[in-house]
Amino acid sequence: MIRSMTGFGSAAADSDGCRYSVEIKSVNNRFFKATIRVPDELSTLETEIESAIAKRLGRGSVLVLVRFVPGGGVAAVEVNPDAARTALTALLAALPDELRDRATVDLGALLAVPGVLRTDGVEKLVELARPVLTRLVDEACTRVLEMRTREGEGIARELARFGETIRTSLIDVAARAPHATNAYQDRLRLRMNSLLAEVGVTAAETDLLREVAVFAERSDVAEEVARLTGHLSQFAQVISSAHTEPAGRTLDFLSQEMLREANTIASKSQDVEIARRVVEMKTAIDRIKEQSANAE
């Protein structure tokens, strides 16, 4: 099955008076790369979220936005009034009497004093959020995959069309190859007779056949045609709906191998018609390579 790497999915829920939401956006990337943005109080869940997404989305650049609005009864950070009072008293006691009455308090500095802020609620908050976010991440991934699958169906149709173009051109190349040898033999005989006629000599048939045999051996593309036919068979399997594994990297590799065989056919053959068919194949292979960059 072909899936695109472009997709979007979101999910939201209320739990224990808190509001949670997850948005996942994915675009093309040769590998899996996740950028996860979570509120500071839930930052310890970032690794778990990335691991869960990596299991569902095999390839692509993924941006994950997690939003969290705490309820009135949930607080990750609380002020310890006793510690704040003790710290403030100590700060004022350190000032000279003439400055004490005019002193102002920097709340930021006061809150930075160790013990003034209690973070005991963070662990409780994370435990409450973990099952909710696990479910929302899974729901958002499902929606991303649904969009990827819909777009992948269009990619699969395009790939099948390009594969058929290559197959048709390859059939023409295989059928044309023997005629190319015969055409070369006719051209060679005409050229040799024309040149030797000026000196009153005729070309020996054995010499002509020997030269044609060398040409036929040098221009034989049967092996390349067979290998390219095999690549096309594997290509058809990969883009079929029965193939459940991610196909993008396999398609990229197959396109490189198909291009290698097409280039070899072009270098071996001197026939204009075969060269034209090779151009058609290489154009289709380039399009397959482009589309494989969009497939998961």
Image: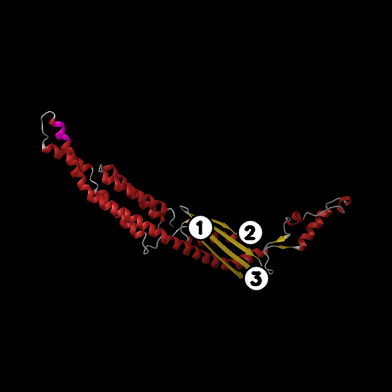
Residue at x 65%, y 63% (from the top left corner): 122
Q: Quadrant of residue 271?
A: top left
Figure colour scheme: secondary structure
Question: What is the three-letter code of the residue carrying label 1?
Answer: Ser
**Side (left or right) of 267 relative to 3:** left
Mark 1, residue position: 26
Residue type at tag 2: Asp
Between the C-alphas of marks 1 and 2, the distance is 23 Å
Q: Mark 1 or 2, which is nearer the eye?
A: 1
First in sequence: mark 3 vs mark 1: 3
Image: magenta residue range = 191-196
Q: Is residue 240 left or right of residue 65?
A: left
Q: Is residue 16 above or below residue 200?
A: below
Question: Which of the two marks, 3 or 1, is nearer to us in this view?
Answer: 1
Measured as percent of width and height from the top left, residue 110 is found at 76, 56
Residue 111 at x, y = what percent?
74, 57
Residue linked to disc 3: 17
The C terminus - image quarter: bottom left
Q: Residue furthest bottom?
A: 16
- Rendered image: mark on residue 40: 2
Chief secondary structure of the magenta portion: helix
Q: Secondary structure at mark 2?
A: helix
Of all residues shown, which one is farthest toward the right? 98
